[in-house]
Image (spheres, rainbow, N blue to C red):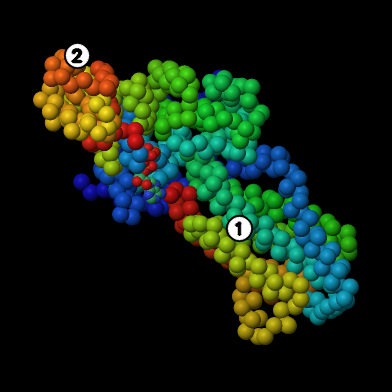
Amino acid sequence: MPERHTAPFVAAGPVISARGLSKVYGELRAVDGIDFDIAPGESFGLLGPNGAGKSTTMRMLGGTLGRTGGELTVAGLDPEQEGPTVRAHLGVVPQQDNLDDELSVRDNLYIYGRYFGLPRGYLKDKIPQLLEFAQLTDKAKSKVDDLSGGMKRRLTIARSLINEPSVLLLDEPTTGLDPQARHTLWDKLFRLKEVGVTLVVTTHFMDEAEQLCDRLIVVDHGRIKAEGSPRGLIAEHSTREVVEVRFGADRNAELAPRIRDLAERIEVLPDRLLLYSDHGETVLEALAARDLHPVTSLVRRSSLEDVFLRLTGRSLVD
Amino acid sequence: MSAPSRRAGVSGLRGTGSAPVLERGLIVYKRNWIVVISGFFEPLLYLLAMGYGLGGLVGQVPGPGGAPIDYPAYIAPALLATSAMNGAIFDSTWNVFFKLRFARLYEAMLQTSLGPVDVALGEILMALLRGLLYAVGFMGVVAALGLVTSWWALAMIPVALLIAFGFAALGMAATSFAKSFQHMDVITFVLLPMFLFSSTLYPVSVFPEVIQWIVKALPLWHGIELMRQLAVGHLSWVSLGHAAYFVAMALLGIAMTARRLRALFLR
Ligand SMILES: Nc1ncnc2c1ncn2[C@@H]1O[C@H](COP(=O)(O)OP(=O)(O)OP(=O)(O)O)[C@@H](O)[C@H]1O
Ligand SMILES: [Mg+2]
């Protein structure tokens, strides 16, 4: 049995803790004083639109980017000061793949393990498992350049597991994956979580956040807008159901004031109106009673997307 | 609560060590050995074209200590010094910049237990290893052609490494300031004239005195002089001075690189 390189954390207190964490680029406050704690074994999400500061936060967690201010500990250490020690416990999946183009698929895993100082014997056993995990066994000798985007992504994720990390930092892990591969990955991440791995995930897919995260923060312009479980956030910031109606691009805004009273809240989007209510069907009936007949209509459950819209006044996916 | 002071010290800059960085370099070399070998022919081609081509016109020139030597024997040590410089500069500037910005190789390395010092030192060592390979090869040819006349010439190999180390350390420090390829071009802009003027192909004494002083302040001239003196075994305190120049340059380069490591890698 090869010696495990990373000792499991002593499960006392949060494994990651940020206080007033900030990163300033010139005038821009990319991360603007955020606080959060992540418990060992928890699956924690950062949800936010482009430019919210998610990747910047992730890179500070991994100690590959210095912070401008605030406190940060990962496994009780400051990642900026003790980078290599902290990262021995981390698996990092950056937003953009940074595989080694000059090496084969197999050698990518091998050398990455060596960067952690892992023994060759351990890697010899571990690499086939990871190739299996990434479904790349038959591509082991290919050059990285010859892989498809989704395959590269899978390799990057497999690579991050080489040191059996106790914390996985996943920056938009499923970007570039087809729906099937996404679900397979979620499944695999779930299994890692079951054996006690802490997951930190950024995403702007709310289904991903809802599937993967026990708890998440909604970030916008480098600040935390809300925090809670996906269900809790929806319950707190939205109604049970949402009615989506389209009257045609030119009439949506015009009709909005006339039906505002039918719902708890109304959002006017360019292509549709969102009516927030605990009873969607009732709203639809009331519309019909006023002789308003939308081109299309749909009643659905509230999602994190609605929470986001409520909190920031903006759509998550732009 | 006041933030505890965050040191900019060396803790966290070292991790696994440089061995895995070297190991990676060797795997890449193994795959691209033709490219690696080809670097060995460059100074050789210069030697043949200039040394024997131009040398036919020039005949003999005064060597170190004034005794006349054949033109190929005059330029061979200079070519060794120059190729040590070129290799080291290329590896520590263009290569580093490319891996940093485009291949994002260091980003991947630094998300493991490697520290910036491990990566920087590993890259410098890799460059030196390549330099060693070329120096040994070139020396073999030069010796076979009878262009060295002293056992001191064996010392040209470690001196080639010393020269390479000085340039690599300083080159990496310079790269930490570069933000774009335009900035990188400045390096070429400095190197080419240095190569042409540093008594590579003819003695520095042909220039007006002011230019001579400038040339003598620049590193390559010291490397070339030292190499020439070793080739014929004409050593003096001056030789030691030239060597000291490179030791100082290497130390300066390392100190600067160490200071700039965060700027270089953790941006
Ligand atoms: N090196 C840098 N220099 C200057 N500004 C930067 C730098 N890196 C990031 N930024 C800025 O910081 C802000 C946050 O960027 P970040 O990459 O963290 O966003 P994100 O939430 O990950 O977005 P996305 O969903 O697009 O990945 C952006 O406005 C970005 O332009
Ligand atoms: Mg991002």
What x and y, as percent, mark residue B59? 88, 76
* Residue A281 image label: 2
Above or below, A225 against A208 in this view is: below
- Quadrant of the image occupied by residue B263: bottom left
Which residue does the image show at 41% across and 38% down from the upper left?
A62
Q: Is residue A306 visible?
A: no
Quarter of the image with the N terminus of chain A in it: top right
Which residue does the image show at 63% across and 59% down from the upper left?
B89
Callouts 1 and 2 close, C-beta under 8 Å: no
Q: Is residue A252 visible?
A: yes
Judged from the image, the secondary structure of the residue bearing numbered disc 1 is: helix
Q: Is mark 1 within 8 Å of ligand 1?
A: no
- Residue found at the very far bottom of the displayed protein: B209
What x and y, as percent, mark residue A231? 25, 20
In the image: residue B70, left or right of residue A99: right
Q: Amino acid at mark 1?
A: Ala
* Residue A112 image label: none
Q: Camera-side residue: B262 or B66? A: B262
Counting the numbered discs, the total is 2
Which residue does the image show at 65% across and 30% down from the upper left?
A142
**Depth-wise, is mark 1 or mark 2 nearer the camera?**
2
In the image: residue A287, left or right of residue B165: left
Within 10 Å of the Cα at label 2, are there few (<14), some (14-19), or many (20+) other Cα atoms? some
Chain letter of the residue beneath label 1 in the structure image: B
The residue labelled by disc 1 is B168
What x and y, as percent, mark residue B208? 67, 85
Q: Camera-side residue: A263 or A75? A: A263
Q: Amino acid at mark 2?
A: Glu
Q: Is mark 2 within 8 Å of ligand 1?
A: no
Ligand 1's quadrant is top left
Judged from the image, the secondary structure of the residue bearing numbered disc 2 is: helix
